[in-house]
Image (spheres, rainbow, N blue to C red):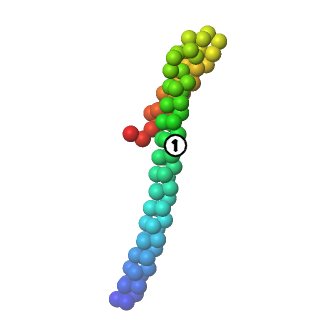
Amino acid sequence: MEIIIILLSALLIIAGFAIRNLTKKNEMLEDFIAKQSEAIDTCDQRLKTIDDKGFFVADDEIGWFFTEIKKIQEALNQFRLR
């Protein structure tokens, strides 16, 4: 009976360490995702500020490039936290 108690106690301690470790990793990943979401929001706002008057889109030489950047930003916007 004592052996079962010792084994269960050891298992409980190991499980506690594993849960603590996984919780720490999860919190780090949540912080990383939140920072990425903030960066995407900042880029989106910056892109809208740059072309608020529509000069880049109307220009033939760089309009296509700016349009492609906007497509990339729209794809990134799908990964924001809501």
Q: Residue furthest right?
A: 61
Can you give x and y, in whole percent of width and height, for residue 78 in the image?
45, 33
> Dot 1, how many residues are within 10 Å of its Cα: few (below 14), some (14-19), or many (20+)?
some
Q: Quadrant of the N terminus?
A: bottom left
- Choose between 71 and 44: the one closer to the eye: 44
Residue 9 in which image quadrant: bottom left
Residue at x-position 38% and y-position 79%: 8
How many discs mark residues in the rendered view? 1
Residue at x-position 46% and y-position 51%: 30
Q: Is residue 45 left or right of residue 63?
A: left
Q: Report whether residue 71 is seen.
A: no
Q: Quadrant of the C terminus?
A: top left
Type of amino acid under label 1: Gln
Can you give x and y, in whole percent of width and height, for residue 54 in the image?
52, 15
- Choose between 25 and 64: the one closer to the eye: 64
Can you give x and y, in whole percent of width and height, for residue 33 in the image?
49, 46
The residue singled out by tag 1 in the image is 36
